[in-house]
Image (cartoon, rainbow, N blue to C red):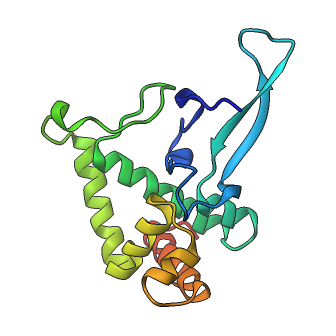
């Protein structure tokens, strides 16, 4: 199975990429799909796609539609605040440190929105979302790191996402 960089994240939904050999990585978060081969349209090839943990949780019914949308919006805001830019269909990426210029207006707006989000969900909620969404850590791994259990961690993650839903009026 050949996985090329251009086959990875192309939207904010698919932006979290963690190496497959990371111990906290869930095997189900890599989704295989068969697509037509661009060089030979008569045959199909298998491509891998990273599925964010919040999308998997939504598919299993652990998150509501609004919580999933809040997780997606929060993830996109983090990318935008870090300097990510939409290249018109190109993969979303972060600007290299040596090529950075003063923050753009989009970055400043995203940073302001993230400050509002942090105020709504608290420091602990933000730390959990960073671990779960950005770092791609499973709830069990997060629970082990903070000496808790995975059910409590998921409840706290859902509470943080519910706070974002209320903040952004998604309900």
Please say if 141 is above or below 7: below
Q: In the figure, is residue 101 to the left or right of 66?
A: left
Residue 144 place in picture, x, y as percent:
50, 83
The one of 86 and 2 positioned closer to us in this rendering: 2
Q: In the figure, is residue 51 to the left or right of 168?
A: right
Residue 51 place in picture, x, y as percent:
63, 51
Q: How many marks?
A: 0
State the quadrant of the C terminus. bottom right
Q: Residue at (69%, 74%) from the top-left corner?
A: 62
Residue 163 place in picture, x, y as percent:
46, 77
State the quadrant of the N terminus. top right
Residue 56 place in picture, x, y as percent:
68, 61
The one of 30 and 74 positioned closer to us in this rendering: 30
> Which residue is farthest right?
42
Please say if 77 is above or below 131: above
Please say if 42 is above or below 27: above
Specify the quadrant of the image occupied by residue 125. Answer: bottom left
> Which residue is farthest top?
39
Q: Residue at (78%, 9%) from the top-left corner?
A: 40
Q: Residue at (52%, 30%) from the top-left corner?
A: 5
Q: In the figure, is residue 105 to the left or right of 5?
A: left
């Amino acid at each position: 199975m050949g996985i090329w960089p251009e086959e990875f994240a192309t939207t904010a939904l698919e932006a979290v990429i963690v190496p497959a050999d990371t111990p906290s990585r869930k095997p189900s978060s890599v989704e295989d799909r068969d697509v037509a081969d661009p060089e030979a349209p008569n045959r199909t090839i298998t491509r891998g796609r990273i599925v964010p943990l919040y999308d998997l949780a939504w598919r299993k019914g652990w998150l509501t539609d609004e919580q999933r949308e809040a997780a997606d919006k929060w993830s996109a805001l983090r990318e935008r605040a870090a300097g990510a830019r939409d290249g018109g269909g190109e993969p979303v990426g972060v600007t290299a440190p040596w090529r950075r210029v003063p923050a753009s207006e989009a970055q400043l707006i995203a940073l302001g929105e993230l400050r509002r989000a942090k105020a709504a969900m608290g420091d602990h909620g933000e730390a959990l979302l960073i671990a779960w969404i950005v770092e791609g850590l499973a709830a069990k791994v997060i629970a082990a790191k903070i000496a808790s259990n995975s059910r409590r961690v998921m409840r706290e993650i859902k509470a943080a996402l519910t706070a974002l839903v209320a903040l952004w009026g998604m309900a």
